[in-house]
């Protein structure tokens, strides 16, 4: 690559177009770094614990170490990631539309709209990704009050653990369970009354 020719070409651009190019290049570099870190599992969150514009609550999904993308669902527009997406849309929008829109004010408005569209597109994308994540995850606390079936016999008076089959959003999970009453044989319908240690269900016979 001839950097002298590139420098001459860049220097010959109108000042406003150079600004769009600089925004586009800088935002693209940061965007690629963010995406690379995310793929490596090192950059999933912004400051404040949000994931792609969503505020992550860090809640345990299964009673163990719940490192998932499930969130509280609150949309946050002003995040580092969305700022980069906004600048990415402005930069490349200004560059691509400069040959079509001659008026600089209209070009600026169009570039800002491109930035807004970019932010909206990424928010929608992350929302869909989180929906996919939630389909494969569950909150154990949501089992309280549910009626389920004993899979492995549960000993009496919390002297040991059996297993029950609980449905979470159509997905059936086998979880350890105890009872404070008499022993409960397999196949018995029970109701979950509480969760202890974020991993063991306390159930009672119906």
Image (tube, helix red, strand yellow):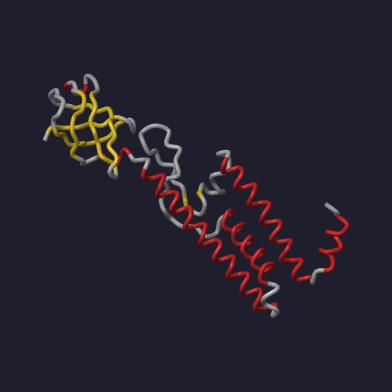
Instruction: Name the quadrant of the C terminus.
Output: top left
Residue visible at 17% across and 36% down? 191
> Relative to residue 47, is residue 182 drawn left or right?
left
- Residue 82 coordinates in the image, percent (x, y): 56, 57
- Residue 40 coordinates in the image, percent (x, y): 58, 38
Dividing the picture into quadrants, the one containing residue 79 is bottom right
Total residue callouts: 0
Residue visible at 46% across and 47% down? 56
Residue visible at 75% across and 71% down? 16
- Residue 95 coordinates in the image, percent (x, y): 69, 67
**133 versus 84 height, above or below:** above
Single out the residue that lies furthest toward the right.
4
- Of residues 36 and 183, which is closer to you in this image? 36
Residue visible at 61% across and 69% down? 112
Dividing the picture into quadrants, the one containing residue 108 is bottom right
> Relative to residue 95, is residue 125 drawn left or right?
left
Single out the residue that lies furthest toward the front.
1
- Residue 155 coordinates in the image, percent (x, y): 18, 21
Single out the residue that lies furthest toward the bottom.
103
């Amino acid at each position: 690559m001839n950097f002298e020719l590139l420098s001459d070409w860049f220097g010959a651009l109108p000042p406003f177009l150079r600004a769009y190019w600089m925004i586009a290049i800088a935002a693209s570099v940061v965007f690629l770094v963010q995406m690379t870190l995310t793929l490596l599992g090192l950059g999933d969150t912004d400051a404040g614990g949000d994931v792609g514009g969503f505020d992550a609550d860090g809640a345990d999904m299964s009673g163990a170490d719940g490192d998932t993308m499930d969130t509280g669902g609150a949309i946050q527009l002003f995040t580092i990631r969305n700022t980069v997406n906004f600048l990415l849309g402005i930069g490349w929008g200004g560059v691509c539309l400069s040959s079509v829109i001659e008026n600089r004010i209209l070009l600026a408005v169009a570039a800002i709209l491109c930035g807004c569209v970019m932010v909206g597109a990424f928010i929608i994308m992350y929302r869909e990704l989180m929906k996919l994540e939630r389909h494969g995850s569950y909150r154990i606390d949501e089992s309280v009050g549910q009626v389920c079936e004993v899979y492995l016999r549960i000993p009496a008076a919390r002297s040991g653990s059996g297993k029950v089959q609980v449905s979470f959003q159509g997905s059936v999970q086998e979880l350890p369970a105890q009872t404070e009453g008499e022993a409960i044989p397999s196949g018995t319908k029970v109701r979950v009354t509480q969760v202890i240690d974020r991993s063991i269900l306390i159930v009672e016979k119906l």
